[in-house]
Amino acid sequence: MKLLEKLAHQLKKTGIAIKKELDWKGLYGLGKGLWKGKDAQEYVNRLREDRV
């Protein structure tokens, strides 16, 4: 969610309607630490359980 919020803020700031090309390099590393201490397989399993 933090990554999406940051991306939305960046899009508003740059004026996507005016500027047609985004600088994706500026987004590099924004999600770093977001998954720290999380087990990827447990996360995927939880997502799959929630779908049922």
Image: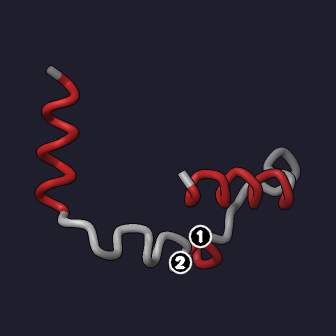
Left or right for 34, reference 41: right
In the shown orientation, is residue 5 left or right of residue 52? right
Cα–Cα span, label 2 and label 1: 7 Å
Type of amino acid at the residue the image marks with label 1: Trp
Question: Local crowd at mark 1 within 10 Å, few (<14), some, or many (≥20)?
Answer: few
- Residue that lies at the very extreme toward the front in this rendered image: 37
Q: Residue at x 56, y 59 (%)?
A: 3
- Quadrant for residue 6, please give it: bottom right
Q: Position of residue 26 (x, y in %)?
A: 64, 77
Mark 2 lies on residue? 28
User: Is 20 or 12 nearer to us in this picture?
Assistant: 12
Q: Secondary structure at mark 1?
A: helix
Front residue of 46/14: it is 46
Horizontal side of 17 relative to 24 (left or right) equals right
**Residue 1 image position (x, y, % from top left):** 53, 51
Residue 51's x, y, as percent? 20, 25
The reply to whether the C-beta atoms of the residues labelled 2 and 1 are less than 8 Å apart is: yes
In the rendered image, the vertical position of residue 16 relative to residue 32, given as above or below? above
**Mark whose residue sits in front, 2 or 1:** 2
**Residue under the image location 59 percent in, 70 percent down:** 24
Q: Is residue 5 above or below residue 38?
A: above
The residue under label 2 is which amino acid type?
Tyr
Q: In the image shown, does 44 or 15 lie closer to the viewer? A: 44
Residue tagged by mark 1?
Answer: 24
**Rendered view: 14 above or below 46:** below
Q: Position of residue 36 (x, y in %)?
A: 34, 75
Above or below 23: residue 14: above
At 58% across and 52% down in the image, what residue appears? 4
Residue 32: give its label. none
How many numbered marks appear?
A: 2
Q: Which residue lies at the image location 53% right of the left edge and 77% below the top edge?
A: 28
